[in-house]
Amino acid sequence: MSQTSALLDAAAKILEASRVDNPRREARLLLGLAFGTEIVGPETNDAVILGAFETFVARRAAREPFAYIAGRKEFWSMDFTVGRGVLIPRPDSETLIDAALKFFPDSTAPFEILDLGTGTACLPIAALREFPNSRAVAIESSPAALPWASANIARYNAPCELLATDWADAPIRRFDMVFSNPPYIRSGEIAGLAPEVAHFEPRAALDGGPDGLDAYRALSTRIAGFLKPAGHAFIELGEGQGETVSGLFATAGLETLAIIPDLGQIPRCLVVREP
């Protein structure tokens, strides 16, 4: 047995004991991180690499998300810098970009884009890739998340203005597209989530209040003020929340155009506009 194989076996046992899914695969990915590449060679002798690998395995065994250990996460075929204090981008959120492309088919138009609660800024940056003549404003109130948004905007040289403020205090401007992935998990359910989420990701980005709808109530009264006459808002939904959230926005005078499912066929994106 090669040294690499023995290392992977030992690491996989540690990860399995911590109930990490696919422990052998995770061990290989962590060793790839230690090498600085996903290609793992037949022998592993370098003390620095071995020390890094040991540290990575210990962090993952503590159920720290792999994305935080790697320092990056793919979203919309782009790499985003991530770390403690910011929500990790999920493939589910790509549904909002897909929806925007359906409702705004002219990719050459100079749209104005707003993202409320931007986190890593993955949504406005992905939208700007698809609408390259557009400009964006990203709003984030969390001091811990702001550096990650700033780093990603700089990394992609995105024409995106980052504002450190709350939705309620954001300056009223009108936009063609408004995106938001608000916190929508019921407060009482967070402790029961996977440890990677419950113990590491920022609670403020997860906690939607007792019924999971607090952020939607706040958004519903503000979205109209951000929309141009032909503007659309693309709001991420938690599982089973589509009709209820649509009703909240209807009460605020907004019309639901569609509730679009993600790849798992879970209703994920609410599309609304002013009537």
Image (cartoon, rainbow, N blue to C red):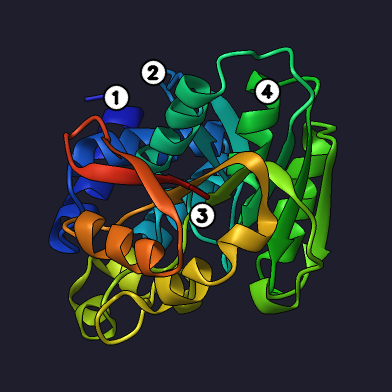
Residue 155 percent location from the top left of the image:
79, 36
Q: Is residue 7 above or below residue 131?
A: below
Residue 109 percent location from the top left of the image:
74, 18
Amino acid beneath label 2: Pro
Residues marked 4 and 2 touching at CB (< 8 Å): no
Residues marked 1 and 3 touching at CB (< 8 Å): no
**Residue positioned 68% across, 36% down in the render:** 125
Location of residue 63 by image quarter? bottom left
The residue that label 2 is drawn on is 42
Residue 175 percent location from the top left of the image:
71, 45
**Residue positioned 14% across, 61% down in the render:** 17
Work out whether mark 2 precedes mark 3 in sequence or the reverse, and give the earlier one: 2
Location of residue 110 by image quarter? top right
Q: Is residue 154 above or below residue 209?
A: above
Question: Does dot 4 land on a helix, a strand or a loop?
Answer: helix
Q: Using residue 266 as the reference point, say whether residue 257 is left or right of it.
A: right
Mark 2 nearby-residue class (10 Å; few <14, some 14–19, many ≥20): few
Q: Residue furthest front?
A: 275
Residues marked 1 and 2 touching at CB (< 8 Å): yes
